[in-house]
Amino acid sequence: SHMNKKDLRSPICCILGHVDTGKTKLLDKIRQTNVQGGEAGGITQQIGATYFPIDAIKAKTKVMAEYEKQTFDVPGLLVIDTPGHESFSNLRSRGSSLCNIAILVIDIMHGLEQQTIESIKLLRDRKAPFVVALNKIDRLYDWKAIPNNSFRDSFAKQSRAVQEEFQSRYSKIQLELAEQGLNSELYFQNKNMSKYVSIVPTSAVTGEGVPDLLWLLLELTQKRMSKQLMYLSHVEATILEVKVVEGFGTTIDVILSNGYLREGDRIVLCGMNGPIVTNIRALLTPQPLRELRLKSEYVHHKEVKAALGVKIAANDLEKAVSGSRLLVVGPEDDEDELMDDVMDDLTGLLDSVDTTGKGVVVQASTLGSLEALLDFLKDMKIPVMSIGLGPVYKRDVMKASTMLEKAPEYAVMLCFDVKVDKEAEQYAEQEGIKIFNADVIYHLFDSFTAYQEKLLE
Ligand code: GDP
Ligand code: MG
């Protein structure tokens, strides 16, 4: 595969941070268009992501011209729609860099919170470049909003008291970040982007600072990661979700971060019970908004090019593992080798599991979240005896029941964002096995440690 300096693909960005800091609202605001006419300035809803062509970004960052120059070397920006740890982990695991840059959202009124710290750890572990959106600046007392303005212009127009409140909250948060080992600086004062994290003050309500954020994302990815963005002919793709869709059977939602996918391509995926080899039957993206009254919800494609989010219909996708890679079998490739390769993503995680010893049973919705959970449990020195993906069934609970005699304090299941089958629930209750299920890792940890303490009493 050859690289081409001129042929850059769109960078991929995802968003994480503590609950209620404004991740969803910020995404909504970024997506909202203030471009007149046309298909929302060419902003398109994809599978699991929103695509911003460069013209839409140009329009949205126009107010930055007063302060900064911008070059536009990439065709656009792909922003992942689902906020949170999980989507980040899925797009950035196993040494890959499917997600090029992350936005860590911090509420300026609250400073660092538990999931902020968790996120920082995750970003650091995965060596992921990120920027901080210091959100909710409109909540500073007496803030006078100028919708969708650049932060610097809006800030200059605030009263002395507002500026002072900002300064004091900002300094406090800078200190809290320093306690986590992070040097930080307002992005326009940041002279050393590789040593200091850039902070962009934003409001997801007024849109102030959003142009700054987009400008910075583009600046950082184009200037500092152009090598990662050079277009490759080989495919890099990750499964975000496995979903049953009427008329298509089980489908997978995929982020294609490099290369092409074509109808009929032979693909290899990681499955719960072993590798899956199948052929792409259909490549689908959502209909543009104004076409919604059309019969089909989806547009079919013969071929798609990175970076984008796409739905794939094919046979035998039922057991596909979310968060794992998708490989395409090329003419030169050995299918068996690819099958081994793709299963390594899952089997690699088994290294952190001691199947003969004492430990808890862990179950998660995707490979990325399982990985993040295992990392966390390792740090907390909680041993793991068995791992699983997808819904919890009776047989999973049975694994945990082997601890009842060996080590009752570990006769539990720690589940991250999964469904628990009724029969499994009944069985667990009858056997006295506690199932903890949460979609925030530290909540899981907190309730588990509280339970252990109670048990020790
Ligand atoms: P998430 O949990 O991080 O996705 O947070 P949400 O986007 O759901 O926002 C949580 C709450 O904060 C909602 O009530 C939002 O309306 C509010 N919110 C989010 N961003 C801002 C902001 O910039 N300013 C103000 N005043 N409220 C915000
Ligand atoms: Mg949300």
Image (spheres, helix red, strand yellow):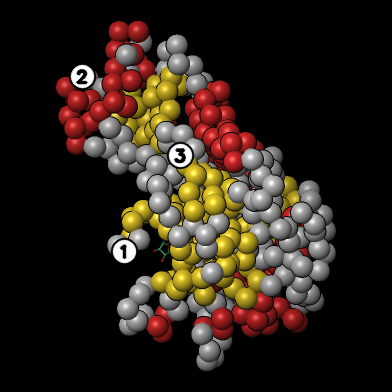
Residue on which disc 3 sits: 271
Q: How far across and how far down the image is residue 242, in percent?
A: 40, 51
**What residue type is disc 1 on?**
Gly
Q: Residue at x 49, y 27 (%)?
A: 377
Residue 384 against residue 134 in the figure, above or below: above
Query: Disc 2 on helix, strand or loop?
Result: helix
Q: Sequence-wise, which precedes: disc 1 or disc 3?
A: 1
**Viewer can see residue 201:** no
Q: Residue at x 54, y 69 (%)?
A: 302
Number of the front mark, 1 or 2: 1
Quadrant position of residue 176: top right
**Residue reaching furthest to the top:** 406
**Residue reaching furthest to the bottom:** 37
Q: Quadrant of ligand 1?
A: bottom left
Separation (CA) of disc 1 from disc 2 = 41 Å
Given residues 7 and 158, the one toward you in this image is: 7
Does residue 353 appear to the left or right of 53 in the view shown? left
Q: Which mark is residue 431?
A: 2
Whether label 2 touches label 3, CB < 8 Å: no
Does residue 264 appear to the left or right of 129 in the view shown? left
**What residue type is disc 3 on?**
Gly
Separation (CA) of disc 2 from disc 3 = 30 Å
Q: How far across and how far down the image is residue 406, in percent?
A: 35, 8
Rate crowding at label 2 as few (under 14), some (14 to 19) or many (20 or more) other CA atoms within 10 Å.
Answer: some
Does residue 431 appear to the left or right of 197 in the view shown? left
Q: How far across and how far down the image is residue 23, in percent?
A: 49, 60
Does residue 68 appear to the left or right of 101 in the view shown? right
Q: Residue at x 27, y 37 (%)?
A: 420
Residue on which disc 1 sits: 247
Given residues 319 and 132, the one toward you in this image is: 319
